[in-house]
Image (cartoon, rainbow, N blue to C red):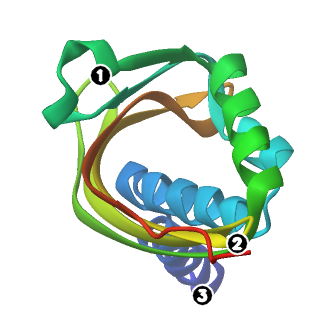
Amino acid sequence: MRATICLLLLITAVVAGAATPEDDAKALFERYNAAWRARDADAMARLVAPDCVIIMTEPGAGAKRTRFFPRDSYIKLVRERVAQLADSTTDQTLHAVSAADRGDIFVIGEAEEHAQLHGRGEVFRYSFYAVARPVSGRMLFRFIVSQLTFYAPSPAPPK
């Protein structure tokens, strides 16, 4: 009897401590942000599903500035960007994380990045909308929309 009670308590503790899909999606964002801070494009690539589509928009610039990227093109862009960075900080806020019945996790948030590139500074603010889903037992990004809401470059210092 005592063994049965101990087993039931152990099972209850394991189930109660199990991560939800929403927790897995939040952890995915944390790993992605850590890879960005480390400037590790390969680590970022491992968090994006092979068939992921990334859309970047600039609302004030119209449809001509909306860019669509398959995963490999996006990772190439990330590699180019991190190669230019002298320093950057990013603050990110997740506003909503919710699971759909079919397994998709929807995430809405915003971020602000301050970057130094070859002697000039940049400030970006953007909203993002993402869909994450377990793929082969791992939570991965399947779809990302990043909407630029503010951009302010600072001029390069005089030579």
Q: Is residue 118 above or below residue 25?
A: below
- For the question of whether residue 46 can be seen, the reply is no
Q: Is residue 60 above or below residue 15?
A: above
Q: What secondary structure is marked by label 1?
A: loop
Q: How many marks?
A: 3
Q: What secondary structure is marked by label 3?
A: helix
Q: Nearer the viewer, mark 2 or mark 1?
A: 2
Q: Counting other residues with Cα less than 10 Å from the Cα at mark 1, is it few (<14), some (14-19), or many (20 or more)?
A: few
Q: Position of residue 94 (x, y in %)?
A: 29, 65
Q: Earlier in the sequence, mark 2 or mark 1?
A: 1
Image quarter in which the C terminus is found: bottom right
Real-space Cα separation, disc 2 to disc 1, in angstroms: 47 Å
Q: Which mark is residue 102?
A: 1
Q: Counting other residues with Cα less than 10 Å from the Cα at mark 2, is it few (<14), some (14-19), or many (20 or more)?
A: few
**Quick check: marks 3 and 2 in contact, CB under 8 Å?**
no
Real-space Cα separation, disc 3 to disc 2, in angstroms: 69 Å
Q: Which mark is residue 119?
A: 2
Q: Nearer the viewer, residue 57 or 23?
A: 57
Q: Position of residue 21 (x, y in %)?
A: 41, 49
Q: Position of residue 85 (x, y in %)?
A: 73, 63
Q: Residue furthest front?
A: 159
Q: Nearer the viewer, mark 3 or mark 1?
A: 1
Q: Nearer the viewer, residue 63 or 95?
A: 63
**Which residue in the protein does label 3 denote?**
2
**Quick check: marks 3 and 1 in contact, CB under 8 Å?**
no
